Amino acid sequence: MIHYLQREQVIPGSLKNVWEFFCDPFNLNTITPSDMNFEIVAGGDTKMYQGQMIEYRVEFIRGARSLWLTEITHVRDGQFFVDEQRVGPYRFWHHEHLFESVEGGVRMTDRVTYVLPFGLLGDVVHSVWVKRRLHSIFDFRVKKITELFRSLK
């Protein structure tokens, strides 16, 4: 089954500053919950660009670290970028990040389309755990991003 997650938030800052923050892969460390033990292993040492491959290690379940390799597949400077999982815990992962100047800052929209492995079993795991976990990760990001950009004002 295909699953979707969409989040919007208005970030108090200029489009230039918000875009620059999100173009630095190492800022993912800051906006990822610490209990995930997120670590960039390779490919994150330059500003984001189309075709960039970034390798992470992440802990979704305590004690079980997973490889996650993403490719930045599309970039339109100051407007959007897309990352897609190439290797990792999902059968399919497509994440769009859209940016738009609005009154009060920048509207950032995350649109994630994903499929879990293991067919029906994956859908059961999604309903009892994965969906709630993804929502909590994105809740954390909204809060952390707002805090970071308010402190920069």
Image: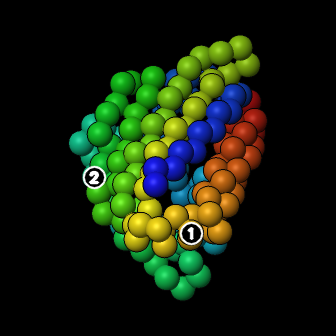
Say what amino acid the circle numbered 1 marks. Answer: Val
Q: Which numbered circle lies on residue 114?
A: none
**Callout 2: SS:** strand
The residue sitting at 68% across, 22% down in the picture is 105
Q: Which one is closest to the eye, mark 1 or mark 2?
A: 1
Q: CA distance from mark 1 to mark 2?
A: 31 Å
| Labels 1 and 2 touching (C-beta < 8 A) | no
Residue position marked by numbered label 1 in the rendering:
124
Residue 86 location, x and y as percent? Answer: 29, 57
Q: Earlier in the sequence, mark 1 or mark 2?
A: 2
Which of these two is toward me, 121 or 34?
121
140 relative to 36 in the view: left or right = right
In the rendering, at what x and y percent does residue 65 appear?
Answer: 46, 78
Q: Amino acid at mark 2?
A: Met
**Residue 53: mark:** 2
Image quadrant assignment for residue 136: bottom right
Q: Residue furthest bottom?
A: 63
**For the point 46% across and 45% down, which residue is it?**
113
How was the colour assigned to the protein in this rendering? rainbow
Q: Can residue 64 be seen in this snapshot? A: yes
* Residue 146, image x, y percentages: 72, 39
Residue farthest along the front direction in this orientation: 120
Q: Residue at x 65, y 15 (%)?
A: 102
Foreground: 95 or 106? 95
Can the viewer see residue 44 in this picture? no
Residue 42 at what x, y percent from top left?
31, 62
Q: Does residue 150 sit above or below 107 in this rendering?
A: below
Residue at 69 percent across and 44 percent down: it is: 142
